[in-house]
């Protein structure tokens, strides 16, 4: 990336219309002489907490804490580094950037690269003209129409057609002053097998330009039309410009939408990307190859950490899902990250994303995306589907298959939900399933299973009750009032935490002074709560949130008891909903 002068940067800052730039992401309204507000483009909210100073060109969100200047805004919303953001804003504003003094060799390399990029750009434009104007491209137009793809979105992706002639691109490029060496370096030509001279590398194929995140064409993916023509897809060869393992198809067009939506949809093919953008899902990309590389994962990470794997439901597609999750897990571990939120979209049998859009409509595809599941749930359900759960042996096999997936998760709601799914499918009690998962051996290497705690419903309730008591100790005046106001016997479902609540209601100020002799379990729990409270802030809001969660759990138990007794539950359900809404409101 070249270095630009400070004066260039400031001229770009002055030239950018910040209201227009931010207004493309969220609706802004005046809120004073030098302040405008709107809904934050970086997180979901209902009440505006995001504001900008259009004069100073600064922004800040009091909800999620993001903020910065005009360049940071472009970086965050479009997945760019600083240099790229500067270049993009300069181009949009019509400001010519001035480079700092440059080494002659660097200048020569930059000039060569710029010529190759220009050659690829003009070739991409030529392929587009051939697709829409040439008679020989009629079969290509028919194929794309059969896939349900419309001309405007195909033009947006600069999809084209390479004519059958041997040297159209070569002759046109040479006429524009490009050398044979440049044609070879750009991957547009290959040497004749017999005799001197060059041949067009791509002939009689639909052309998909492969661009970097700034939209510069670096190469092409070329699809054959004839069923017997091999290979079906022919890519530009690896070169000084084109590295397939570092590209994500559609990233240049998806980055703004990914920043707005907070997610990426990762599909298998070029036409899937185009079809989903046409369907109003512009945050869609596909990887260049069968397995994600570290460089591609880094490119995805720059766009957004949430990735929805939307692969064909056939064997190859499911293998792609498996490879994708493994690659992301390895990437996170190698870079000490936990940032990728990987989810899986389950498509109807026999259909790829483009098929769903074409046959069922855009709304159906969007609905499928909303039903995506965490990859761990996908793994568990896939293993259960493959198992013979009708026999004891088959259930044992299923437990061995799903145990490593469950053990990888920290105790929490997701792990608990998976235990319930497994218990229901295997028709086993939840506690038995939890214990079986804990003891199940590892299937691959024969090493004994590491101790792992699998959270049950009782564990989840006890965790909430302990958290509430710790908060009472962390902010004792408010904690004392909360304990005095509540029905402890109804609010606490676990015997030990119920005992601790009764004890702390009387001894909150000095909980270690009056512990009854012989009550070892109570003493151990109170000590744990006191030490844990020492690391908590005196936060009344956190205490109230834990109190609300206790109320929700209590109402869940009361609703279940009423249902067992055949009694009406509408009043209880309404109370539970009010508590649930209050919890959600306080978590936003």
Image: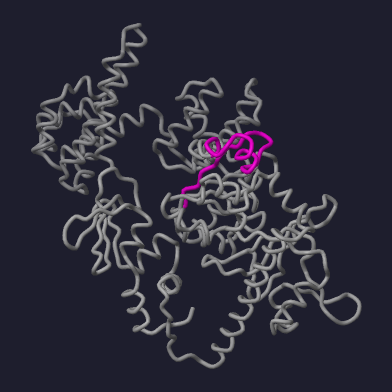
380 w.r.t. 424: above or below: below
Q: Residue at x 36, y 31 (%)?
A: 459
Left or right: where 133 falls relative to 449: right
| Count of residue discs | 0
**Magenta-tinted stretch:** 340-365
Q: Residue at x 58, y 40 (%)?
A: 442
Q: Residue at x 55, y 44 (%)?
A: 279
Outermost residue toward the top in this view = 566
Q: Is residue 350 magenta?
A: yes
What quarter of the picture does the C terminus occupy? top left
Say how the picture is coloured: one colour
Kindly indicate the quadrant of the structure image that contains residue 425. top right
Between residue 397 and residue 294, name the one nearer to us.
294
- Residue 251 percent coordinates (x, y): 54, 59
Left or right: where 521 falls relative to 388: left
Between residue 323 and residue 501, name the one nearer to us.
323
- Residue 546 percent coordinates (x, y): 23, 35
Outermost residue toward the right in this view = 194
Left or right: where 467 falls relative to 77: left
Q: Is residue 458 magenta?
A: no
Between residue 371 and residue 490, name the one nearer to us.
371
Outermost residue toward the bottom in this view = 104
107 w.r.t. 221: above or below: below
Kindly indicate the quadrant of the structure image that contains residue 411. top left
- Residue 225 percent coordinates (x, y): 79, 53
392 w.r.t. 137: above or below: above
Q: Residue at x 58, y 37 (%)?
A: 361
- Residue 574 percent coordinates (x, y): 27, 20
């Amino acid at each position: 990336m070249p270095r630009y002068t400070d004066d260039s940067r400031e001229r770009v800052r002055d030239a950018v219309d910040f209201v227009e730039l931010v207004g493309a992401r969220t609706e802004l309204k005046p809120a004073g002489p030098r302040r405008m507000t709107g809904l934050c483009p970086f997180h979901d909210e209902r009440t505006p907490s995001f504001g900008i100073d259009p004069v100073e060109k600064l922004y800040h969100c009091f909800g999620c804490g993001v903020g910065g200047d005009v360049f940071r805004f472009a970086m965050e919303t479009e997945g760019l580094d600083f240099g790229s953001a500067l270049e993009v804003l300069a181009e949009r504003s019509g400001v010519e950037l001035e480079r700092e003094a440059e080494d002659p060799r660097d200048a020569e390399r930059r000039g060569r690269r710029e010529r190759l990029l220009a050659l690829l750009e003009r070739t991409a434009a030529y392929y587009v003209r051939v697709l829409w104007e040439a008679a020989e491209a009629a079969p290509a137009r028919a194929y794309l129409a059969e896939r349900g793809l419309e001309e405007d979105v195909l033009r947006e992706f600069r999809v084209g057609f390479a004519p059958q002639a041997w040297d159209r691109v070569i002759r046109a490029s040479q006429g524009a002053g490009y050398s044979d060496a440049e044609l070879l370096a750009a991957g547009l030509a290959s040497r004749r097998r017999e005799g001197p001279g060059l041949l067009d590398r791509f002939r009689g194929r639909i052309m998909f330009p492969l661009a970097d995140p700034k939209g510069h064409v670096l190469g092409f993916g070329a699809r054959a039309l004839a069923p017997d023509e091999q290979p079906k897809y022919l890519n530009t060869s690896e070169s000084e410009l084109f590295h397939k393992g570092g590209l994500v198809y559609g990233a240049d067009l998806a980055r703004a939408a990914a920043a707005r939506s907070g997610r990426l949809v990762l599909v298998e093919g070029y036409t899937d990307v185009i079809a989903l953008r046409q369907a109003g899902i512009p945050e869609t990309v596909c990887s260049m190859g069968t397995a994600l590389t570290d460089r591609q994962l880094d490119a995805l990470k720059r766009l957004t950490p949430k990735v929805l794997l939307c692969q064909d439901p056939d064997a190859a597609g499911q293998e792609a899902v498996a490879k994708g999750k493994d690659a992301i897990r390895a990437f996170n571990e190698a870079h000490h990250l936990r940032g990728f939120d990987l989810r899986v979209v389950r498509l109807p049998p026999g259909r790829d994303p483009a098929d769903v859009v074409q046959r069922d409509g855009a709304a159906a595809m969007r609905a499928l995306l909303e039903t995506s599941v965490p990859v761990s749930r996908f793994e568990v359900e896939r293993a259960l589907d493959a198992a013979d759960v009708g026999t004891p042996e088959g259930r044992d096999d299923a437990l061995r298959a799903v145990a490593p997936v469950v053990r990888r998760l920290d105790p929490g709601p997701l792990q608990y939900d998976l235990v319930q799914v497994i218990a229901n499918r295997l028709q086993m009690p939840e506690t038995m399933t939890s214990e079986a998962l804990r003891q199940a051996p590892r299937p691959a290497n024969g090493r004994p299973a590491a101790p792992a705690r699998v959270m049950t419903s009782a564990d989840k309730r006890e965790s909430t009750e302990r958290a509430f008591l710790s908060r009472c100790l962390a902010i004792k005046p408010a904690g004392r009032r909360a304990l005095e106001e509540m029905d402890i016997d109804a609010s606490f479902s676990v015997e030990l935490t119920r005992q601790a609540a009764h004890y702390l209601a009387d001894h909150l100020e000095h909980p270690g002074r009056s512990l009854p002799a012989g009550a070892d379990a109570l003493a151990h729990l109170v000590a744990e709560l006191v030490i844990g409270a020492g690391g908590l802030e005196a936060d009344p809001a956190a205490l109230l949130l834990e109190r609300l969660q206790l109320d929700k759990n209590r109402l869940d138990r009361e609703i279940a008891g009423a249902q067992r007794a055949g009694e009406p539950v509408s009043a209880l359900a309404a109370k539970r909903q009010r508590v649930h809404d209050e919890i959600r409101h306080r978590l936003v």
